[in-house]
Image (tube, grey):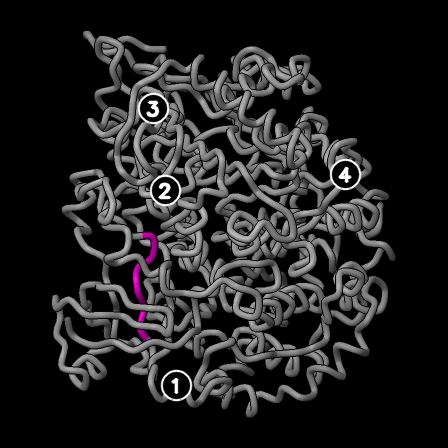
Amino acid sequence: MVTESNTTTRKGTCPVCGTFCHIVAHIDNDRVVKVQPDSESVLGHLCIRGVNGVEYHDHPKRMNYPLKRVGARGEAKWERISWEQAMDEIAAKLESIRDRYGPEAVLVLGGSPHGPGDPAAWKWCNLWGTPNFFHLGKNCGEAEFPVECAMYGYDTIAAWATFLNPEKTGVLIIWGANPSESQPRLWEGYKYSQSQGMKIIVVDPRPTTCAKAADLWLQLRPGTDGALALGMLNVIINEGIYDKEFVEKWCLGFDELKTLVQQYTPEKVSEITWVPADKIIEAARMYANASAAALTWGVANTHLGNRAGLSGVMGKCWLRAVTGNLDREGGQVFSTPPDYTAFLEEMNWDSQINHPLRTRDTVSADQQSIGSVKALVLYHEAMKRVYPKGWGAAQYFIYPSPHACWEAILTEKPYPIKAVFDQGTNTLCSIGDSRHAYEAFKSDNLELHVSMDHFLTPTGALADYVLPATDAMEHPTITNLWGMTGSEFGREAIVEPMYERKDDYQLWADLGKRLGQEKNWPDTLEGWLNKLLAPAGVTLRELAQTPGYFPVKEYKKYEKTGFATFSGKVELVPTVLQQLGYDPLAGYEEPPWSPISTPDLAKEYPLILISGSRVKEFHHSSHRQLEKIRKRYPDPVMEISPEKAEELGISEGDWAWVETPMGKVRQKVKLLEGMPPQVVHADGYWWFPEKEEAEPSLFGVWESNIDAIVPDEPGFSDYAGNSYFRGLLCKVYKD
């Protein structure tokens, strides 16, 4: 801590999203008055959201006290209660629900993380015995985890989410992601590497900043990612530019893959994707011939619906594998779990698998088995030879589908869900077919709904209890990306919590202590973080004084241990997926609604819709209260090509309707040069905090919220139950 004049400065964590950037805060009379990036930290960065962190932290609409509903759900009638009363009443209701319906009748929804709240929730669920929990990883590409881990027993999220050394990485493919908006710090690093010689290929239908800066831009038809990947594999395999030594020594199923890709010539794939055949060939050669290459994850690939999503993710995994880029320096480096801490012991996934009271799997286990206890067991068995304590990000093997959760509330099938917790989720603005979730939250079948957040949201407005959460300036934090990476960063709280805000950990600790879990919960978040760090021989305070911990870089770890699969090799036809009922070799399939798969529907809805791409100003549905940000980005935006807009009689700045077979919402028109005339993009996650809370307004949640008009039921949602946000059909007309 440093004192200058009358202002104290203290290092801490930015409060506005889950990126956990490091800041220096200026404090006057115990209030934060200014924030700036911590130039001494590798995480020292502030985006447009972060520079408004003070407004976020001290906003007049922040939740400051526990509230209990006294009117009907959505009526905006509340009474202030104490935290103790809230915990006592909630715990009593939970105990009653468990006695009558079993522990699985509780659903936990996690959201944009602002600290270690998600791991605390997973720990509580595993101790309680409910497998029904998921967080907004459902919108952030989490469905790539189980496919990667099935194929090669590791995930590679850490490979591209760090600085890429241009002396080692020859080519980077940014596929289905737009880091110039979603990860500005990362994009700056990519641009530097490109200036030093690294080539960038971008796969995206939209003319994004990344696409315009790319050395090669593959502007594909939305939803055809799987076909494009198979076309590139056709070139790589048939031209013999795959890594023969790696494939022969370490891969199983290559002959089956080779047979599959013969159907996908560059010419045929060009017809499917709109990408010229010569560009498909050029991209394949650039990627395969690079000394080392990386290929990003991308949220878009898991939003394509049904098998279209799986074929895209499988294709990307195959590309990484056959080119020998797995765990190669400069290539697709494997993540390593933080097993030098007690993280995995504290999560204790075995307690979920073997819980004495749990008798049922997730509510969607029979629909999307990749998110189930059955899947968790299979992955654990496949990976235990290399990771006997389990995988750091094991939560991604168990998440149920949102659709099945709402059905379990409304129909009580396959069994009832009677209680819901949402922490920072704002589910009505983050999940497809959000009216389905609304019906569930309003249902008399739901006996308990607890919302914990920084602000009252449309989702929280339907709750029975609303609890005020601290932000990252008010509580300590350690960062290991939810068990996904072995690096570890620690920061202490900058200021004491304001009003009666409590950290997310405290919710689960206080409930746990009331429900027979006393020995499992240290009294405070800092105490729990110290417990997590104890095996490393360091306390939170000590870690916070360091730049962080980085594991020693080690490449080709599989040469010592084999791959963390049943066979010990890369399974190009993954055993785990087959045992879960998926066909890895089914090849490309059109999205559920497309000009090809549903030509009659396309006559009425002739445009292809992409929705929910990231923008700098907002993190999912957050930050719409912030005055400076709303001045920059006041309204929901629909992007359309100038040619198509002229044809439809709409102009820049007009309000227009975007309509799908599920309904319509209203957004403001932005003309975008370079957008294919057959494609439109609609902003996601919109609500209006300035509008009335009580229904029918519900903060204007149904006015512009694209999530309300995209489907998420089986047959539309992807292989892991993610909503169908991209590559569907719509029509656009002037308001």
Q: Earlier in the sequence, mark 2 or mark 4?
A: 4
Q: Amino acid at mark 1?
A: Ala
Q: Does residue 212 appear anywhere in the picture?
A: yes
In the image: residue 102, left or right of residue 5: right
Q: Which residue is mark 1?
A: 602
Q: Earlier in the sequence, mark 1 or mark 4?
A: 4
Q: Which residue is mark 4?
A: 353
Residue stretch in magenta: 680-685
Nearest to the observer: residue 423 or residue 250: 423
Whole-percent x and y of residue 422? 46, 37
Q: Which residue is mark 2?
A: 459
Mark 2 vs mark 3, CA separation in Å: 14 Å
Mark 3 vs mark 1, CA separation in Å: 47 Å
Q: Which residue is mark 3?
A: 67
Q: Amino acid at mark 2?
A: Thr
Above or below residue 643? Residue 682 is above
In the image: residue 667, left or right of residue 237: left
Considering the numbered disc 4 on the image, is that residue within a helix, a strand or a loop? helix
